Image: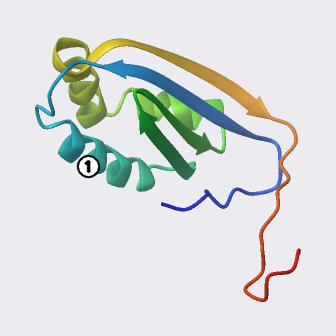
Amino acid sequence: MAIAATPATPYYAVIFTSLRTDGENGYGKMAEAMEKLAATQPGFLGIESAREGLGITVSYWESLESIAAWKQNSRHLAAQERGRDSWYEEFKVRICRVERDYGFERSSSGGQI
């Protein structure tokens, strides 16, 4: 996975933090399907995810309207329901407006950009 290439600010981030239940129970397959589906949604900008006990997935969006549309997508609604029933002990969703965005990338020659 790579760091998402996001546009100039401002844009929005949805931070999904979770603690899983025991067992796979189809979670990986559904997570992959939801990432692919999200990428087809108007306003989607990118996604980053990590899991080591605590899971954190950050998706990036052009607007609050695009986030609301994604939340109401019928396939996403079904995945949300299954998450509450089977995959999560606990989760939290935070929606933020990104005001600043900067970073570092090592070039292939080992220097700084």
Whether residue 84 is situated above or below residue 70 in the rendered picture: above
* Residue at image coords 75%, 57%: 7
13 lies left or right of 93: right
Return the residue at label 1: 33
* Residue at image coords 37%, 19%: 19
Whether residue 6 is situated above or below residue 95 in the rendered picture: below
* Residue at image coords 42%, 37%: 51
87 lies left or right of 39: left
Q: Along the line of sight, which residue is nearer the eye, 20 or 91?
A: 20
Q: Position of residue 56 (x, y in %)?
A: 50, 32
* Residue at image coords 28%, 23%: 80
Crowd around label 1: few <14 · some 14–19 · many ≥20 (10 Å): some
Whether residue 22 is situated above or below residue 34 in the rendered picture: above
Q: Position of residue 92 (x, y in %)?
A: 49, 14
The picture quadrant where one finds residue 21 is: top left
- Please name the colour scheme applied to the rendered image: rainbow
Q: Position of residue 36 (x, y in %)?
A: 34, 55
The picture quadrant where one finds residue 14 is: top right
Q: Secondary structure at mark 1?
A: helix
Give the mark count: 1
